[in-house]
Amino acid sequence: MVFDITDRNSFESVEFWMENLSNYADPNIKVILIGNKSDIAAKRVVSEEEGKKEADKYKMEYLEASAKSKANVGELFIAITEGILENRAAGKGVKTSTEKGPVTLSSTVANKANSEEEKKKGGCC
């Protein structure tokens, strides 16, 4: 769940979206609270402490990131992947008929590393 650290209304909407998740989403989903736009912290109106407190209220992890500068974006995807893998290992979550065996974080990270190497070589996106 993402909110804008430079927009108080965005932060105050977290409660509304958490209620919706509670009412309609699978109870085993991995939710992380993300304060976005950390690259323009000078315009911050929501403190990191407020973000952490809100995340604690819902027993979520809290992370600040920037889509623009890509700060913490990789860490965010790793955290989400770890949550998904933990749920799968515990037999939680939605399974589909298209699942093709186990996925490990190390293979996910390795694929990302290979992708980064391809970018350096001028390969695909």
Image (cartoon, grey):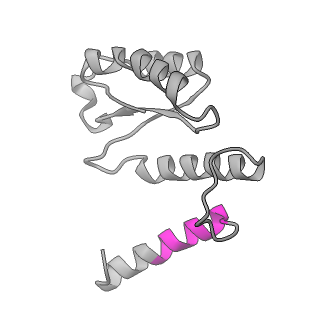
Residue 13 % position (x, y): 35, 18
Quadrant hosting residue 50:
top left
Horizontal relation, residue 70 to residue 28: left or right:
left
Whether 125 is drawn above or below 82: the answer is below
Residue 63 % position (x, y): 47, 35
The rendered magenta stretch, by its main secondary structure, is classed as helix
Horizontal relation, residue 95 to residue 10: left or right:
right
The one of 42 and 84 positioned closer to us in this rendering: 84
Q: Residue furthest right?
A: 90
Look at the image and give the residue range highlighted in magenta: 103-114
Whether 30 is drawn above or below 95: the answer is above
Instruction: Give me the residue at 60% from left, 58% from top.
Output: 96
| Quadrant, the C terminus | bottom left
The one of 8 and 48 positioned closer to us in this rendering: 8
Marks counted in the figure total 0
Residue 44 % position (x, y): 27, 22
Horizontal relation, residue 28 to residue 69: left or right:
right
Instruction: Give me the residue at 61% from left, 63% from top.
Output: 97
Q: Residue furthest front?
A: 97
Residue 110 % position (x, y): 57, 72
The one of 72 and 103 positioned closer to us in this rendering: 103
Magenta highlight on residue 125: no
Quadrant hosting residue 1:
top left
Instruction: Give me the residue at 69% from left, 69% from top.
Output: 101
